[in-house]
Image (cartoon, rainbow, N blue to C red):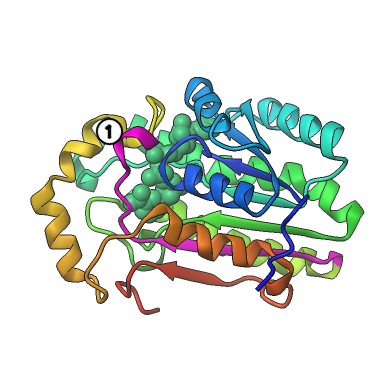
Amino acid sequence: MDLELAGRSVIVTGGASNIGRGIALAFADEGARVWIADRDAEQARRVAEERSGLVAQETDVTDPQSVSRLVDAVVADAGTIDVLVNCAGWVMDRLFLEQPRDEWQHEIDVNFWGFLNCTRAVLESMTKRRRGRIVSIASDAGRIGEFREAVYSGTKAAVIATSKAIAREVGKHGITLNVVCPGVVPPKREATGTGSMWSGELAQMYSDEMLQKVVRAYTLRRLGTPEDIANAVLFLASERASYITGQTLSVDGGYVMA
Ligand SMILES: NC(=O)c1ccc[n+]([C@@H]2O[C@H](COP(=O)([O-])OP(=O)(O)OC[C@H]3O[C@@H](n4cnc5c(N)ncnc54)[C@H](O)[C@@H]3O)[C@@H](O)[C@H]2O)c1
């Protein structure tokens, strides 16, 4: 199936690491031009060197002015934004009663404000062109509420509900919004930078023993890969998915069957 993504202009937030990197590389392999919009400029540059068609653009999704500079740069270069993938995110696994408020705030800022800032910013251009695809990476936590991820679950549920609400408003302009919910996708060491949530305490929490437990809970008995997530994202970003909007797809080896 030809996804007809060649020549499309694509923004992938959080594209410097793990899942976002996998998505950026997959779009590049289809011939798209991809802006890696990430706070971790050094790692974004490293990923941009992996394929032609990739551009690193230092961006903080929590800062509307930074997002505005990103959108201006893409429109100045490509004339339009065809696809936005909201992938930048952050989580720290702790019991709700033990999680400090600054971690709540950081999860809300990156996961929900980041989604709002980027989605709002690209809709101007997409509405004018009467075409656009927005695919946001949430999490199964946002569908079922995950142990030790209370506030994170709330931010991802917000991404799911808000995507549906905006989808209803902009469908008449030919714009779709859909959400992909990965299960656990541990990164390869070389595929993350210092900006990754996996570069600190979180990686230690996901020990080999813990990951084996996760595998046993997954129907297909394996962990996800960035490529698994990218396959779903590329389809939803393509013309082949032009009649699909407001949907939430778990890509998690059959963990959540909602
Ligand atoms: N990996 C998993 O197991 C998993 C599971 C479910 C959902 N998710 C979601 O998938 C997405 C990607 O996860 P990942 O494992 O690739 O994470 P990651 O931490 O490895 O990568 C996230 C990237 O986002 C960037 N980033 C963070 N804050 C930013 C900001 N304010 N502005 C711009 N960039 C910023 C980081 O620099 C990093 O490069 C996240 O939204 C996450 O919540 C991941």
- Image quadrant assignment for residue 147: bottom left
Q: Name the residue under label 1.
A: 100
Compared across the picture, whether 21 is left or right of 7 comes to: left
The amino acid on which the numbered mark 1 sits, given as a three-letter code, is Pro
- Indicate whether 133 appears above or below 16: below
- Looking at the image, which is closer to me, 237 or 130? 237
| 223 falls in the magenta region | no
Looking at the rendered structure, the secondary structure element under dot 1 is loop
Compared across the picture, whether 254 is left or right of 56 comes to: left
Query: What residue is rendered at 52% in x and 63% in y?
Result: 231
The image quadrant where one finds ligand 1 is top left
- Looking at the image, which is closer to me, 195 or 7? 7
- Give the x, y percent position of residue 168: 72, 69
- Give the x, y percent position of residue 85: 61, 50
- Looking at the image, which is closer to me, 253 or 70? 253
Query: What residue is rendered at 60% in x and 61% in y?
Result: 234
Q: Quadrant of the C terminus?
A: bottom left
- Indicate whether 230 appears above or below 89: below
Compared across the picture, whether 238 is left or right of 92 comes to: right
Magenta extent: 173-191
Q: In which quarter of the image is the N terminus?
A: bottom right
- Mark count: 1
Query: What residue is rendered at 70% in x and 26% in y?
Result: 65
Q: Can residue 152 be seen in this view?
A: no
Taking the view exactly as shown, the residue that stands out farthest to the right is 128
| 186 falls in the magenta region | yes
